[in-house]
Image (cartoon, grey):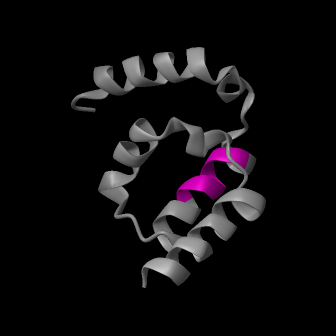
């Protein structure tokens, strides 16, 4: 994978800031987040890593109780 070293450095930095990332289950925690970003937020798949590297806190945020209400609030007032 081209450029994967950069992503490893980003992930190591994120582990320092959010150690809970080490215990996340990909199937129950990470895949739903990627699905949310792809379908609800409509971020193109090639840009998912950019979103997560710019805001790694997304990985430890709750989708139903935190991100969905925030997205609906922003869509209501921006649109």
Relative image position of residue 8 (x, y in whole percent)? 40, 21
Q: Residue furthest left?
A: 2
The residue located at (56%, 62%) in the rendering is 35
Q: Nearer the viewer, residue 62 or 34?
A: 62
Residue 33 lies in the magenta stretch: yes
Query: In the rendered view, would you say 19 is above or below 61?
Result: above
Secondary structure mostly seen in magenta is helix
Q: Nearer the viewer, residue 51 or 1?
A: 51
Magenta-colored stretch includes residue 40: no
Q: Position of residue 73 (x, y in %)?
A: 60, 74
Q: How many numbered circles are shown?
A: 0
Residue at 48% x, 69% y is 41
* Residue 17 occupies quadrant: top right
Residue under the point 67% across and 40% down: 60
Residue 14 image offset from top left, x and y in percent? 52, 23
Q: Quadrant of the C terminus?
A: bottom left
Residue span colored magenta: 29-34
């Amino acid at each position: 994978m081209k450029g994967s070293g950069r992503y490893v450095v980003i992930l190591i930095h994120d582990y320092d800031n959010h150690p809970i990332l080490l215990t996340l289950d990909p199937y129950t925690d990470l895949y739903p987040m990627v699905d949310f970003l792809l379908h609800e937020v409509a971020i193109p798949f090639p840009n998912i890593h950019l979103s997560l590297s710019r805001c790694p806190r997304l990985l430890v945020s709750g989708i139903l109780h935190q991100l969905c209400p925030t997205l609906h609030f922003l869509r209501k007032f921006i649109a």
